[in-house]
Image: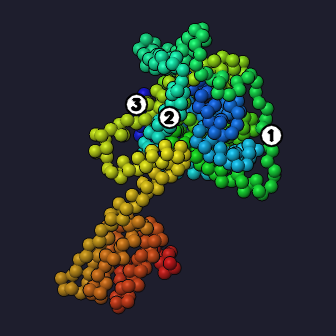
Amino acid sequence: MTDMTAPSVAPPAQQGHEDSPSVVAVLRAPSLLTRETLAGVVTALALVPEVISFSFITGVDPKTALMSSIVLCLVMSALGGRPAMVTAAAGSIALVVGPMVKVHGVAYILPTILLAGGIQIVFGLTGMARLARFIPRSVMLGFVNALGVLIFAAQVPHVLDAPWAVYPLFALTVALVLLTPRVTTLIPAPLVAIVVVTAIVVFGGVVVPNVGGEGDMSPGLPGLTPFLAPLEWKTLAIVWPSALSVAFVGLLETLLTAKLVDEITDTRSHKGRESWALGVANICAGFWGGVAGCAMIGQTVVNVKIGGGRTRISTVAAGLTLLLLVTALSGVMARIPMVALAAVMMIVAVTTIDWRSVSPATLRRMPRSETAVMLVTLGVTVATSNLALGIAAGVLLAFALFARRVAHVVSVERSLSPDGSAVLYTVDGPLFFGSSNDLFERFAYAADPADVTIDFSRAQIWDASTVATLDAIASRYRGHGVDVTFSGLDSRSSAFHARLSGTL
């Protein structure tokens, strides 16, 4: 398995079919089935504290968020394009929906989710998920590191200003997670740690904050979510900004997490299928549960790296375990100490961060522009707790720095004939808006003789900005009584130039 501490962008998947064991193969192999099932159980336990905490940001009760996570997990297990990736009610979505709920109320959550889900379905079916391949590796590293920081920071309140018993339990949990794999790998270490610490607390009568203290854990399932917002244009005006944010934040986090899992498992996924399936899952979760979600990188790491999950069975097991915890085992779930869950997620956060990318040796070798993009993505995401803003800032900076570099890749050589009656310019490099803007200044219009040829055999025209620049060059030469000749254009560039020249 690939080392999680050195993630890189996986090759873009075209037709995402898992190369890991098939579901049928797992069902026929008891050892694989046990591994997948236990991975799902650990993942479900890791979901509980974060989903509950995110519910307060969204403005709904914990059971609503947990039910939504069950629906998301099971629907994505059936339809998604990235097996073993965990989808649930996420903090990034809560941060988008929360402000709207505070102003307009919970009635507007459902129409927001329905519109966002529709956008995600269109995004996936039209193939726009392929745009994720244009996200630079430095942005990917910033995304991974920022989520590691945010996951860790979200657990800190559970171990600060807590009863004294929390600290030895925290140390015990960390020790069990780190040392259990040296004894056995049959049972995931986090599961061992959570069970042992919970048993100590329950049978030892230790009083520490538990899951039950975070919200109502009474058994039972909520009914279908009623559509309470008025069906009018005003409702659309209220929800569409949040819906767009939910759609694209969810897509960004999901697609980047899918790329990360592709790298960890050395398999490929279908990003388009993952996108439209997320839209379907969010619509289902909106009607039965109430809130939207997306891929959860921390819990995905628990499932894939710590638990060893590789197929859809692991995420089905996670969804069913969560369902069991919400219904028949709600009393048991309520007694799980928060410190045990927090300690597990802190270890996940530490292993999520790509420490190599921020090591002094790497920073010395890495181009400053790449480091700047990674740090900006990291800084903006952590400062705002908004993945969309962090990714947008990183991508925009990467594009700006790229445009600055390519603006100087075009060279122009001037050759004067022996008798001085003709001049040949040779243009070398790709010509588009970033590189052709200063092309106009590369010619000696007033000093050139009457016979001027510009050779493009080592260049290509890629956009209308370049055609406009060539028209301006020709016009300037005509002003000096010279008819310039453009030569060497390949067939595509020549046709493109002929179609637009004189119209811009």
| Residue 425 image point, x, y percent | 29, 76
Say if 228 sits above or below 157 in the image. Answer: below
Crowd class of label 1 (few under 14; some 14 to 19; many from 20; radius 10 Å) = few
**Residue labelled with disc 3:** 3
**Residue labelled with disc 2:** 153
Q: Nearer the viewer, residue 126 or 435?
A: 435
Q: CA distance from mark 1 to mark 2?
A: 35 Å
Q: CA distance from mark 2 to mark 3?
A: 23 Å
Is residue 181 in view from this perspective? no
Q: CA distance from mark 3 to mark 1?
A: 46 Å
- Residue 478 quadrant: bottom left
Q: Nearer the viewer, residue 494 or 411?
A: 411
Q: Residue at x 54, y 12 (%)?
A: 196
**Residue labelled with disc 1:** 226
Crowd class of label 3 (few under 14; some 14 to 19; many from 20; radius 10 Å) = few
For the residue labelled by badge 3, is the local secondary structure a helix, a strand or a loop?
Answer: loop
Is residue 212 in view from this perspective? yes
